Amino acid sequence: MATVGRALLILALAVAAYGIFASIYGARSGRPDWVVSGRRAVYAIAALVTGAFAILEVAFLRSDFTFATVAAHSSTTTPTFYRAAAAWSSQEGSLLLWLWLLSLWASLVLFLTRRTLRRVAPYATAVLLGFAAFFTGLLVFLETPFGLSAVVPLEGNGLNPLLRHPSMTIHPPMLYSGYTLFAIPFAFAVGALITRQVGAADWIRSTRRFALAAWFFLGIGILLGARWSYAELGWGGYWAWDPVENASLLPWLTGTAFLHSLMLQEKRGMLKIWNVSLVLATGILAVLGTFLVRSGILDSIHAFGASTLGVPFVILIGLLVASSIGLVVWRREALRSENKLDSPLSREAIFLANNLVLVAMAFIVFWGTFWPLIAEAITGTRRALGPPWFDRYTVPLAIVLVLLSGIGPVIAWRRATPSNARRNFLVPGLVALGAGALLAAFGAADKPLALAMFVCGAFVVGSVGQEFWRGVGVRRAMTGQGPLGALVSLVARNRRRYGGYLVHVGMAVLFIGVAASTAFNAARDIRMAPGQSVRVGGYDFTYVKPTSAISTTSSGELEKISFGAVVDVRRDGTKITTLRPERGYFPSLDGEGLGAIGRFFEGEATSEIGLKAGMRRDLWTAMTPDIRGLLPTIREGDRVFKAAGGKLSPEVQARALGAALTGLVNRYVTDPPPATFRIITSPLVTWIWLGAIVVFIGALIAMWPGGDAARRRVRAGYAARVAQDLAREDLARV
């Protein structure tokens, strides 16, 4: 089957090359049959890559270790759920996932636009096929997922224990869906520039929903990664400004800017150069994010490590940057704005300011991420910038961004008059001032940046709440509906507007959670023996007793050894909760030189945190056991088993090994050494996840197609024609 999978990829590469030629030839020669053939090449690639991906998935599910990728990243002891996801834990499997998602999304958009955008679509098809050819070429020549094992092992290496978390099975498909979906507006922007269709709204309207879907999926991927980091890595945070984290944030920031400024081009014919530059930059940054994970040029816990893919990706990114700049310069005359900014006090000005802030944040993140390479090129020494540097510049910009997201929905288009501004900003302003005064009275004034974020977040909630209140009032007056019915019909009639409002509220809630959990958390690293206590953030944490366990798979094989703790949490003498952090030790499959017992403590180790989440505060702890006292016993056991090598039957040796390991874990409980704990009390962390849910609900509402949208457009067009005919008749009478 590996041969079949590789053959499918080779065939897909040939089809991609043909499709590029057919699409461009059909567009240049005016031959629609060739254009159709190029589009069908995308469908064919989707089918071929789907077959290849299915073969790889079946190999993982069956633990077929004749596939070198399966042997390196899975095992028979890996649970089925994680075996299915292990395909994209590898370099080559993740590239195949990228290609598969690209082919599916490209097929969908080309099918939906098959009767429209006849001039733009062929070039967009060629660009999408170019991406497909690049990734297929990597899979055929450099990182094949269908390589065979030189010697077929009886057991595979298994999935990295850090990836055995539900969010990490969903995180890569969400992230890659965002990356590949951003390739679609990129491709159509290139097509619009080549054909001088930059002023037409059709290509924007056709790809807007895909840009929003890309923003949606990429946002989900980023939040799932943050949740995994918070729950699995054991350092106590959810965002570390890691290079790979930053790489996913960059296209999300520029994509957010594009979705906002797009409205100015649709309504006022403004910012055409800016918009097309944003969409091209977003597509390039999506490829850059894929490159960073695979090149090994920057250190990251999320990266695959050094590989041979750096040079091809650099060439691709260089080509994309050069061609994008060339196209924009070439069509600069056609990209002139039809209107100018009427007033700095207008919705257009706020949208422009919003864009500038988002792009400034993207530039700061880009500069800080690549600073090690910049510093090395200038000074010869690689130096990384830590979280304090990023926070120094991004936090003030985030506060301004939240404030603008509250002003935008209520300020007037073109020019805001004093009376209009007073009417729209009075209630949100009072809500913000009231919230600020209340929070300052409770001590928030000690953290001025956090207080500013709380005030701006309250302003957003007040302004959006006011818009919903007014809209519901109007609907009730017009239809006589109840409040709930009026709300539902209000949102249903203008999904894009009110879905966007919900996104603003969700982002405000999310940023409030970030500000509170960052500014007002209390953290401490402490070494404690059973019975000892420590006070952190007004809570008393007591190390009650140690725990230990040997976990086995369904087939009875040892999976990991865990050492943990029972931690009692009280406040003012009242018990709040019991936390059970632990650290799991997975055996190394490379047993040579490690010893029969020692190998169980030399593999991967993971932290399972103890967490009590709440609306007001999270109580979080991780622990690191001190196993140095067990090392003499482990070494003695290794010596004994080595001396007995070949003298005991496998069954007797397995029983003896089990008894030795059981004795070790029991000894840890009966004679427990002190353990090192990281204890954190962090307020409003739950608001981050709740805010994200609100954001994604709003995005779904904005993306959801209106069932009667087409009919409304037809009725509007018919009404316009009738009005024109009546006007002509009136003129004829005159």
Image (cartoon, rainbow, N blue to C red):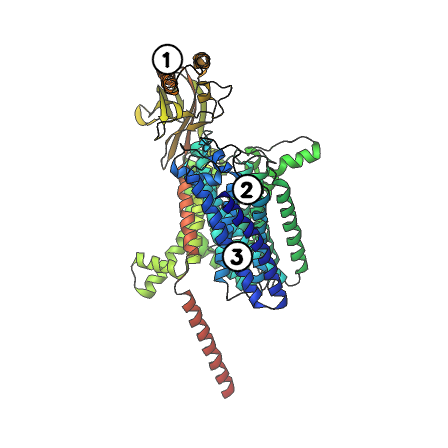
The image shows residue 143 at horizontal and vertical percentages of 56, 41
Instruction: Kindly report which numbered mark, 3 or 1, lies closer to the viewer in this rendering.
Output: 3
What is the three-letter code of the residue carrying label 1?
Asp
The front one of 346 and 243 is: 243
CA distance separating discs 2 and 1: 51 Å
User: Mark 3 or mark 2, which is nearer to you?
Assistant: 2
Q: Which mark is residue 42?
A: 3
Q: Is residue 414 visible?
A: no
Kind of residue indicated by mark 3: Val
Q: Is residue 124 left or right of residue 159?
A: right
Which element is circle 3 on?
helix
Disc 1 crowd, CA 10 A, few/some/many (<14, 14-19, 20+) = few
- Quick one: 269 or 580, which is closer to the camera? 580
Q: Is residue 584 above or below residue 338?
A: above
Q: Residue at x 56, y 54 (%)?
A: 352
Q: Do residues under tags 3 and 1 come within 8 Å of each other at their CB atoms?
A: no
The answer to which of marks 3 and 2 sits earlier in the sequence is 3
Q: Say few, some or many: other residues with alpha carbon within 10 Å of mark 2 (under 14 / 14 to 19 / 20 or more).
A: many
Q: Residue at x 52, y 57 (%)?
A: 42
- Lower position in the chain sequence, tag 3 or tag 1: 3
Q: CA distance from mark 3 to mark 2?
A: 21 Å
Circle 2 residue:
144
Q: Position of residue 588 (x, y in %)?
A: 47, 25
Which structural element holds mark 2? loop
Instruction: Provide the secondary structure element on which disc 1 rests.
Output: loop
From this viewpoint, is residue 573 visible?
yes
392 lies above or below 594: below
Q: Amino acid at mark 2?
A: Thr
Where residue 348 sits: x, y (%)?
A: 54, 57
Quadrant in the rendering for residue 436: top left
